[in-house]
Amino acid sequence: MAAQFGRRLRRGATTTAVAALAVAALSASQGPGAVLASDGGGEGRTSGSAPSDDSAATGNSPYYTDLPPLVTPNKPGTSTNLPLTGTAESGIPASVLAAYKKAQQSIASSDAACRLPWQLLAAIGKVESGQARGGRVDANGTTFSPILGPVLDGRGFAMIKDTDNGAYDGDATHDRAVGPMQFIPSTWETWGQDGNDDGRKDPNNIYDAALAAGRYLCAGSRDLAVAADLDRAVLSYNHSSEYLRTVRSWFDYYRRGTHEIPDGTGVVPPPLDGGSDPIPDTGSSPSPTPTPPTSPKPSTEPSKPGGGSTGPTPKPPTITPAPSPSETLAGVENAGTGALTATAGDAFAERITVRAKNRLGGPLAKVSVTFTVVGDTDAAFAGGKTAVTLVTGADGTVTAPVLQAGGTTGEFTVRAAATGRSLPGATYTATVTARQADAIARTDDKALTAAPGAEFADAVAVKATYKGAVASGVAVTATMITDADEPAENDKGPYFKDAEGNTVRTLTDLTTDADGSLVLPKIYADDTAGTYKLRLTTEGGATIVIELTVEAPAA
């Protein structure tokens, strides 16, 4: 559980009822220390390897959610499609609830033996992110802003060095847990799913994250209707007995009754630092050991007839308003980048620049943007990187590093998008052209002659240039041609030999060296005397025709 932001378990609320619940949960599992045996890898129904019980899907940092209220609005066994009444904690935002139920149905069709209850996903989602910050998601189920856990740099949290080059969490030094179910990037790479069928696996999307969490919990041969297997699954998500007790408590709470509420109206745990949001949109992490707030405890006594309570009245939860359109990222766009063309081995003169824009079309600063080289190419950014993450400046723009062409010619793509977000991005087509020459000439003027059936004593040496400068690495084609208005490959006269010693009269794998020079392989004469032509053509269209003579030596 990598985005849990401070230890706020309500110890004062552990009445006999809570104590009994915790004891029951641990008794069923024989205690956390007794259920750490491996589940046997992939020996079961799910794809991928089973997570080991001493690892975690998340960053193993302290969770921030309280235990659920002891007085629930609905009795066990009642419908889960209840009206919007009762304790607000029992309400789950519509898109979030739909994602949990869709994940349960999907896994039931492919892994029925796991018997995953959607209430377990709801319990983990509550602990990890407060149900995606109270359901602050768009119509596709993607959070309006990334839910990022603390930097996992070993200071108060686990030490996990960067595994995704910042692609998911915007941090190229250390990992951070991402999304409503708080997956570590490396774990998401293995377990990520496309739960809403949009062709993407996005940890910030509640449908994708819920399905991934479900498959992770079902790994191996687990049957989550068995208490010990359920405990193993939860502990594999975050290896903490306190975490297990908290998730178990919420699981039991949701099984006793819940209802659907509109997106964005769910309860978000109070902030730990006195701010307005427990998971700020800036992505900054709170102190690893914050001071727990002193909010009043909910009543542990039954409600009085008429709605009164014998205990103190809890402070109503604070609903954080959604960011204004000027503060909400709408995507990134091209900021005037021109054509991307370079010769093989050279740097692209044009650098890619994008602009992050808000929902009003204006610029947005401090947005993490990832530039990615895609396609069959050896081109890369400076330092050989194929993905680079940078942050936009005050004007909303950011420029990628210099792009370096490799030896592979042709087209490839560079994509720029908000890091870890399913938002519109910018796509660029880049072209690498072969090195060219506009002139080619012999380096000497010796006559090239050979006796019938012999080999030419002198080699053919040429040099290529481009705009007067040395043209290195230029492809050259050599062909023995006929003496006609439209020359074709000659089928008699001088020839080359391939690696197997076969006769060939066209060579295509020739390239000029660092100083633009090229020495052709040895040329042989057949038994037919005469004057013949050898044509050399460079990439770029430079051509030279060289005369070869086959004649018997003078008496």
Image: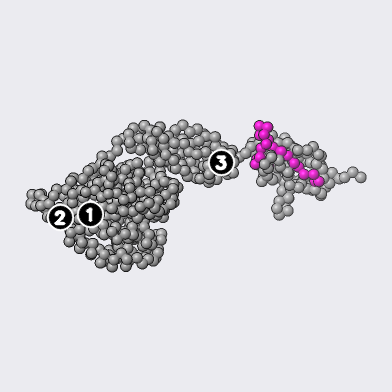
The Cα atoms of the two marked residues, 1 and 3, are separated by 58 Å
Please, what is the three-letter code of the amino acid marked with disc 1? Answer: Arg
Please, what is the three-letter code of the amino acid marked with disc 2? Answer: Thr
Report if residue 286 is visible in the image: yes
The Cα atoms of the two marked residues, 3 and 2, are separated by 68 Å
Name the image quarter holding the C terminus.
top right
Q: Measuring 20% from the left and 51% from the top, which residue is drawn there?
A: 90
Q: Measuring 29% from the left and 47% from the top, which residue is drawn there?
A: 132
The Cα atoms of the two marked residues, 2 and 1, are separated by 12 Å
Which circle, 2 or 1, is nearer the viewer? Answer: 1
Residue at the far right in the pictured view: 555
Question: In terms of sequence position, does the residue under pointer 2 or pointer 1 come before the other?
Answer: 1
Relative horizontal placement of residue 345, taking residue 119 as reference (left or right): right
Residues packed near mark 3 inside 10 Å, few (<14), some (14 to 19) or many (20 plus):
many
Q: On the image, which quarter does residue 483 sit in?
A: top right
Residues packed near mark 1 inside 10 Å, few (<14), some (14 to 19) or many (20 plus):
few
Secondary structure at numbered mark 1: loop
Return the residue at label 1.
10
Residues packed near mark 2 inside 10 Å, few (<14), some (14 to 19) or many (20 plus):
some
Q: On the image, which quarter does residue 390 sit in?
A: top left
State how the image is colored.
Answer: one colour
Number of callouts = 3
Q: Nearer the viewer, residue 230 or 301?
A: 301
Query: Which residue range is magenta in the image?
Result: 456-477
Secondary structure at numbered mark 2: loop
Residue 116, position as x, y percentages in the image: 29, 59
Relative horizontal placement of residue 456, taking residue 182 as reference (left or right): right
Return the residue at label 2.
300
Return the residue at label 3.
405
Residue 468 part of the magenta segment: yes
Relative horizontal placement of residue 228, taking residue 465 as reference (left or right): left
